[in-house]
Image: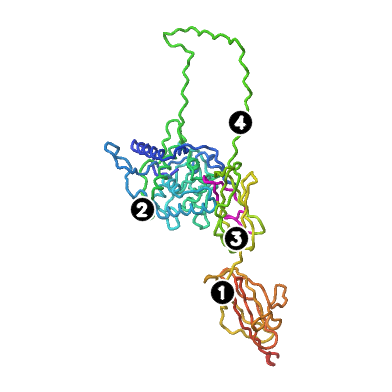
């Protein structure tokens, strides 16, 4: 699943020795009773609208080759061991800056939309190391796109999976067969389903490390996986490439990066030196894990040389007929995790308040417990936005289903407020049960704490004519206050001003004269008022503007008498 690097090699004795030590150390680190990190079940269920990773045959890259180098050992080379052991030292732990940033951004993004997956960026780093040597040592441009294509071999069935062209060569330049592409080695058909725009440039490019890292993360998180558990992490890696050797290699690097790493400049990362292809073994042209054949049963009916060929004496019939066996009953199936949930509790959800158009600072977080108060993992919880509101979860969804983690907790995705203000409800319910709880949320109007006129020219007009354009700007905490409601009103003078029914006016949408009108600032906080007409007796009139938030500004409008010259 790595890039094609010009030759196919096989592990030497040194690499095998390192693998054995690394696997032994990793196995020993598992807690008693924990699932083996090298055994995983198939049949993962994907997220809605996605294909199942475990069922995609060659995984992400169609069984392309990958690097089999293992991380350095912590102990120095012992006398008599192979001289080909990987070189130890701090350089090996360095990850190129753009590549490391892409992994960490993908982790943050997925934490905001699929918190229950608990994707660690170190897992992306381990896969990126095995697939492409961290984008060939970080040879990427400022946007994170590889300086030259990273392509796997043609998937023509000759030693790899047979996958005919699906993209007309758009990504891999091959119009006959597909090839794995980019730092995370996606084949075009898989990228068509899982491709992402990780750097926000409006494109989904498998050659861009930000796009590829986010796509890999979403692929690993498909279904209801919780990557904080060993079993689900193994399943995720095996869905990427269903090979025990691949899993051991990725696991070794995952453990290594979890112990510590650091950033190095782009283009200076350590390139792998070991094999770039899996050891397929005889009779396994498509690669993948070997299967131990079942032992052939010995023909017990054939007499050995020198022994009697007489048939054995038949056993005597039983004096009594055998008693019939009691009928068997199918065992009652164990309840699913969701069926085990007896209570869904608030687990630290804070006040859910946001200004229109902005993200809520807090999320809904709940904990699932069974009848004796024990946390329930892998229970499916559906979060739903309920009420007269246009608030949604990230991606525009009003309902999202996630699974609880090992500690029984799960958090909703980030909520984003719409333009409609007021209260609504977020409901968390356990699928297939009546267990649920609700949370109140509120969207408040955008506010401005200051508003000022942007022009300085005195506003004077002869009765019957119009005033020059009136423009203002609203701000909130020193920044432009966009889409803030503003009320413009002609007021009387005095300590307790009221709406003035005389003097300048503007018109509403129907063309009727009005002396109070509701307006909204532009995205940059600016506001151009409609035309005001000079009317009433000569004198100075007051136009007051008041924002949502209480900021005000008063502007003088002076009406001059219409002279005889003007009248003629």
Give the label, 1 or 2, closer to the camera: 1
Q: Which mark is residue 268?
A: 2
Q: Where's residue 291, x and y in %?
A: 46, 31
| Position of 466 relative to 110 (above/below) | below
Q: Nearer the viewer, residue 564 or 343?
A: 343
**CB under 8 Å between discs 3 and 2:** no
> Is tag 1's residue or tag 3's residue first in the polypeptide sequence?
3
**Residue annotated with mark 4:** 331
Identified at 66% across, 57% down, the residue is 387
Q: Callout 3 environment at 10 Å: few (<14), some (14 to 19), or many (20+)?
A: many
Dot 1 falls on a residue whose secondary structure is strand
Image quadrant occupied by the N terminus = top left
Distance from disc 4 to disc 1, alpha carbons, whole Å, reads: 71 Å
Check if mark 1's residue and mark 2's residue have beta carbons within 8 Å. no
Q: Residue furthest front?
A: 372
- Mark 4 vs 1, N-terminal side: 4
Q: In terms of secondary structure, where does tag 3 sit?
A: loop
Examine the rendered structure and indicate whether residue 538 appears above or below residue 193: below
Which SS class for mark 4? loop
Q: How is the image coloured?
A: rainbow
Using the rendered view, name the quadrant where residue 278 is placed: top left
Q: Nearer the viewer, residue 205 or 503?
A: 503
């Amino acid at each position: 699943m790595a890039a094609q690097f010009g030759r196919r090699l096989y592990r030497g004795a040194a690499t095998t020795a390192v693998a054995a030590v690394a696997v032994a150390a990793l196995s020993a680190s598992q807690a008693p009773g924990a699932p083996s990190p090298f055994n995983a079940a198939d049949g993962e269920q994907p997220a809605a609208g996605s294909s199942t990773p475990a069922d995609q045959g060659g995984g992400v890259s169609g069984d392309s080759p990958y690097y089999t180098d293992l991380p350095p050992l912590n102990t120095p080379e012992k006398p008599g061991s192979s001289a080909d052991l990987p070189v130890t030292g701090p350089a090996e732990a360095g990850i190129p800056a753009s590549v490391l940033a892409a992994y960490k951004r993908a982790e943050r993004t997925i934490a905001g939309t699929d918190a229950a997956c608990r994707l660690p960026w170190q897992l992306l780093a381990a896969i990126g190391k095995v697939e492409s040597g961290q984008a060939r040592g970080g040879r990427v441009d400022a946007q994170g796109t590889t300086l030259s294509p990273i392509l796997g071999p043609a998937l023509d069935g000759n030693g790899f999976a047979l996958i005919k062209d699906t993209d007309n060569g758009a990504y891999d330049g091959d119009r006959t067969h597909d090839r794995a592409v980019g730092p995370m080695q996606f084949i075009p058909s898989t990228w068509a389903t899982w491709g992402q725009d990780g750097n926000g440039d409006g494109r989904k490019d498998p050659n861009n490390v930000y796009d590829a890292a986010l796509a890999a993360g979403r692929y690993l998180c498909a279904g209801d996986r919780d990557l904080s558990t060993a079993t689900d992490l193994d399943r995720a890696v095996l869905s990427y490439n269903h090979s025990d050797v691949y899993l051991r290699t990725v696991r070794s690097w995952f453990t290594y990066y979890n112990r510590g790493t650091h950033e190095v400049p782009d283009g200076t990362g350590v390139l792998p030196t070991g094999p770039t292809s899996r050891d397929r073994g005889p009779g396994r042209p498509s690669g993948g894990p070997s299967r131990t054949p079942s032992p052939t049963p010995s023909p017990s009916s054939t007499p050995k040389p020198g022994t009697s060929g007489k048939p054995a004496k038949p056993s005597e019939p039983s004096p009594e007929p055998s008693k019939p066996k009691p009928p068997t009953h199918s065992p009652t199936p164990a309840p699913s995790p969701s069926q085990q949930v007896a209570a869904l509790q608030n687990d630290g959800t804070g006040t859910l308040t946001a200004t229109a158009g902005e993200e809520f600072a807090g999320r809904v977080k709940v904990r699932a417990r069974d009848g004796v108060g024990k946390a329930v993992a892998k229970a499916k919880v559906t979060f739903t936005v309920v009420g007269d509101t246009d608030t949604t979860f990230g991606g525009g969804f009003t309902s999202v289903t996630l699974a609880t983690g090992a500690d029984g907790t799960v958090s909703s995705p980030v909520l984003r407020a719409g333009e409609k203000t007021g209260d609504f409800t977020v409901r968390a319910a356990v699928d297939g049960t009546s267990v649920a709880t609700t949370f109140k949320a509120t969207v408040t109007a955008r506010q401005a704490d200051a508003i000022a006129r942007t022009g300085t020219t005195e506003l004077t007009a002869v009765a019957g004519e119009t005033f020059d354009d009136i423009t203002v700007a609203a701000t909130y905490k020193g920044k432009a206050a966009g889409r803030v409601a503003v009320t413009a009103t002609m007021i009387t003078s005095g300590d307790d001003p009221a709406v003035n029914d005389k003097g300048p006016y503007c018109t509403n949408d129907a063309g009727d004269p009005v002396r109070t009108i509701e307006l909204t600032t532009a995205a940059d906080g600016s506001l151009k008022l409609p035309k005001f007409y000079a009317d009433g007796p000569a004198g100075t009139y007051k136009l007051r503007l008041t924002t949502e938030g209480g900021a005000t500004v008063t502007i003088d409008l002076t009406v001059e008498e219409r002279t005889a010259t003007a009248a003629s």
